[in-house]
Image (cartoon, rainbow, N blue to C red):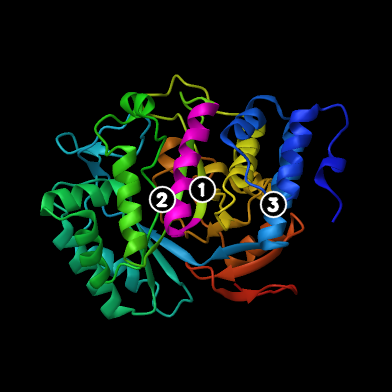
Amino acid sequence: MEKIASMLLKGQGPELERIAEKVNSGLRISDEDALFLFEHAGLSECGILANHVREQKNGNFTFFNRNFHIEPTNVCVFTCNFCSYSREYKHREDGWELTAKEMLDKVKAYDGQPITEVHIVGGVHPKMDIVFFAHLLKSIKEHRPDLHIKAFTAVELDYMFRKAHYSALEGMRYLKEHGLDSIPGGGAEIFAAEIREKICADKCDADRWLEIHEAAHVEGLRSNATLLYGHIESPAHRVDHMRRLRELQDKTGGFQTFIPLKFRNKDNDMSSIGETTLIDDLKMFAIGRIYLDNFDHVKAYWPMIGRSTAQLTQAFGVDDLDGTIDDSTRIYTMAGSEEQTPALSTQELIDLIRGAGRVPVERDTLYNRLHVYEEAVTTQ
């Protein structure tokens, strides 16, 4: 394979060429290398490097699944400054609280459809404890055993476990026994304590988030990891965050996907902060792909950044576009995301992927390939 360094524009300096040689040789880049890319490298150079890593790991394939979301409540005991979604428990006039039956009914609405995953996340409600959710998980599994349940951010789990006086391992084992299959990556935000203190002071800290994900991995559950970017953090904070993820992945191998999440500034306490540009967004995805060499996948969550940007990210390290969603999430639409009615048919996702010159692959939650769409299809 032609060396990546020779593909880069000449005159970019020895630092960029040295990093390119590392990437070309399959060597891990350092924190200093990643910071250099954020602060000095151009978007095109980052894209070339990221695309090389992407294609080394996943060829020309881009993955998606058929999924829907259940959001049990937007009532929350926490008051994160960046959140446009949650409503404080004491001020919940425009909040919602679904019963276990209402959530099971949402699952039943997809009976007979080839959905493979239900994604359950929401606010941290003081009355929705671990027993309540264990009952919900069991009910879903009894109704539809084949449906993969990906549920509860580490923040939700931390509250449940502490309230039940369970350790992270005990709580994870209890939920797994009742039907939990994997956990999403939300709640990570930015790990740096000085930033968390300003944007989500009452939420569990970085060490606890990592402890809960490690417990999931020990129990044989896979998980994802996120990073909330584009607010008051610096490139150094992003690199520090990714380093901690990379270190835990070295230890457990339990992470599947890294998902950069763009800060949206509508109707929250950080609305005065401007949002990142498209160039910044694409660079974040690219550097995440280059740095996290032990993550198999990087995902662009299309409801947050919009389908057009998500399509572009496939040239900047991204090999997963999440799923059909079916207009079943309000977490990001309430914050002003590009997609105010987040739903894509299978065919629309296939077309979105093909439009970037990639081969669509329908997967399950654990990245088992269910169908490779080499030829044009006409059905949903």
Residue 8 drawn at (x, y percent): 83, 38
Of pointers 1 and 3, the one earlier in the residue sequence: 3
Task: Give the residue number, with chain letter if any, for mark 2.
Answer: 185
User: For the image shown, how many numbered marks are present on the structure?
Assistant: 3
**Label drawn at residue 72:** none
Callout 3 amino acid:
Gly
Residue at 46 percent across and 65 percent down: it is: 67
Of pointers 1 and 2, the one earlier in the residue sequence: 2
Residue 337 drawn at (x, y percent): 50, 39
Callout 1 amino acid:
Ile
CB contact under 8 Å: marks 1 and 2? yes
Question: 309 left or right of 102?
Answer: right
State which quarter of the image contains the N terminus: bottom right
CB contact under 8 Å: marks 1 and 3? no
Residue interval drawn in magenta:
235-256
The CA distance from mark 1 to mark 3 is 22 Å
State which quarter of the image contains the C terminus: bottom right
Task: Give the residue number, with chain letter if any, for mark 1.
Answer: 259
Our reading of the magenta stretch's main secondary structure is helix
**Residue 121 visible within the image:** no
